Image (cartoon, rainbow, N blue to C red):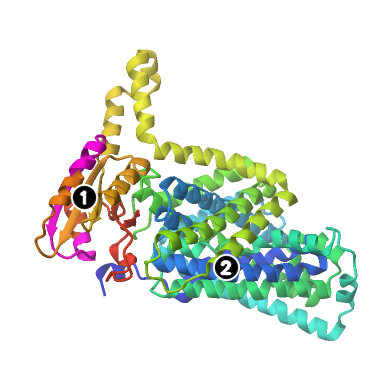
Amino acid sequence: MKKEDVAHPKLNELQATSICGNDISSSCLYVSALTIAYAGQYAWISLLIVALVLFLFRKIYGEVVGALPLNGGAYNVLLNTASKRTASFAACLTILSYMATAVISAYEAMFYFHDIVRSLPLIPATIMILLIFMMLAIIGMGESAIVAVIIFITHLASLSLLVLTCCWFLFNNGLTIFQANWHMPVTSGGLLTALFLGFSAAMLGISGFESSANFVEEQKKGVFPKTLRNMWRVVSFFNPAIALLALCIIPIPSINNHQESLLSFMGQTAGGGWLSYIISIDAVLVLSGAVLTSYVGVTGLAERITLDRILPNFFLAKNRRGVNYRIVIGFFLLCVSILLVTKGNLANLAGVYTFSFLLVMALFGVGNLLLKAKRSKLPRMENAPVISVVIAIFFIIAAFVGNMELNVLSFYVFIKYLIPAMLFIIIMLNRARVIRYLIYSVTYLGEPVRKFILSNVRLHRALVKIKSQELVFFTRGDNVSILNRVMMYVEDNEATKRLKIVHIANTESNNASLKKDIEVLDRAYPEIDIDYVEIAGHFGPEIIDRLSKEWSIPKNFMFIGSPSNKFPYHVSELGGVRLIM
């Protein structure tokens, strides 16, 4: 075992499932009531349709992460199959989703706790929950996983107790209430409309499914697909079952009157005050666990995009436990600011939460299709049929449209949050150009501008620092057309303009044609400084690691073309080397 593995042990199946499972399984607390509000007595059918969609996404996620097992989720697959701008858009949506998830979950947890402690101030208590889990995330992944496991097992036990108690209630009281509910008119229109709107609302029940892909590098080998399977099993059983049982023991008007605490009301109805109390405590715990999931997921994603220079390098600092504590603290401050700005208005945050999550799922499906088209030779454990991917994306689009129909104001709130976030990302991606514009302003507009902007010297230093980062492309002796595509990628996606083209071979070979092609490209792209290097050896993880240390170039700034199925290494063994063709 390697030394770093001892210092940072990987997560096992239970730990990884618990971290992401707390997020997705917490949906049981609200999704049944929400679905019943739109689909009425057919809510459990809408939830079964959602389970079918999630089953399709199991294969989609399994194929993508199996081929590219790196942190980042949708960002990672789009970075390796599309452009950096498209990948940055997915990253921005994912961070917005995590932000809204953390704030909503913390606030809802304190809302449930408020039923027990009436004097509890909701906003300060929510900030305290965010602070507690910030500190837990800073302590380290292992300690966070222990807490997540305890919360997850407690939650499953509480839900199982609720289901069994409701079944016992039915055994003693019959199906009279269900029959009355079944014959009630549907308020949302016809059957198909009710199922569609119920499905759109029920899609919130699988938010969190994408979390496991954002910290896959912290999981033991083979654990990731098991986390997908376990999450699917939990929500596919409990969400429809709880909706069906609610319709069996509570009249629909009463369900609609207890949307925010339906499960505790079910416990009160079926078992009495003791069960209602247990469900309320469980709600506090699992919603708090969803906050932890947000911290873990956003840390893995933010570290990845910072390494790719989409966020400032300031966030890469780690504590002695190997945690990016500045990312964790920054996320906490962002969550608190959003909470204070919205004053706990969950309707506004729900818009950010819903549409961000659905777009991330859709982009992951698109990334799967691009992976099939551009990286078909990459080895993978699973292979989702194209038709199933298209169907899954169609369902996501339908849910997106349905949620716009349910609450178009939430969509406008989502846009208000998305635009400034994307402006920040665009500025970071184009910061070299922005600095050049600032230099122009300082040079030609004179002293008044210099007082409000950094000095010309400091701006030049910042520009030199950005452009000094070298990139590496490992070539197999590719022809000029392939190398030209590499140059185009660098020109379109990277701020730096220094590129090493490296050819590694076991034996001496005549590279006269390759050198000639590079000379042609050097003239065709005068703004890119090309350095050709020949190295004797065997291409693999060892030489990549050695060159990364010798040249002080991070591995995520090293590129290769898409390897064939005869390539002796998996992409995950190359330490984060990017596929750009």
450, 77: nearer the viewer: 77
Badges 1 and 2: C-beta atoms under 8 Å apart? no
**Can residue 507 be seen here?**
yes
Q: Amino acid at mark 1?
A: Ile
Residue under label 2, please give it: 388
Which quadrant is the N terminus positioned in?
bottom left
For the point 45% across and 47% down, the residue is: 88
**Can residue 267 be seen here?**
no
Residue furthest bottom as drawn: 171
For the point 35% across and 21% down, the residue is: 440
Residue under label 1, please give it: 501
- Residue 397 place in picture, x, y as percent: 63, 55
Inspect the magenta stretch and tell me whether residue 293 lies in it: no
**Hey, which quadrant is residue 216 in on the image?**
bottom left
Identify the element where label 1 is drawn: strand
Drawn side of residue 400 relative to residue 208, left or right = right
Measure how far apart labels 1 and 2 are at the Cα level. Answer: 39 Å
Q: Which residues are magenta?
A: 519-545
Identify the element where label 2 is drawn: helix
Q: Against 274, is 96 above or below?
A: above
420, 495: nearer the viewer: 495
For the point 45% across and 65% down, the residue is: 64
Label drawn at residue 22: none
- Residue 282 place in picture, x, y as percent: 64, 69
For the point 74% across and 50% down, the residue is: 405
Q: Amino acid at mark 2?
A: Ser
Drawn side of residue 261 relative to residue 211, left or right = right
Drawn side of residue 101 relative to residue 180, left or right = left
Q: Against 384, is 434 above or below?
A: above
Between discs 1 and 2, the one toward the N terminus: 2
Drawn side of residue 504 relative to residue 309, left or right = left
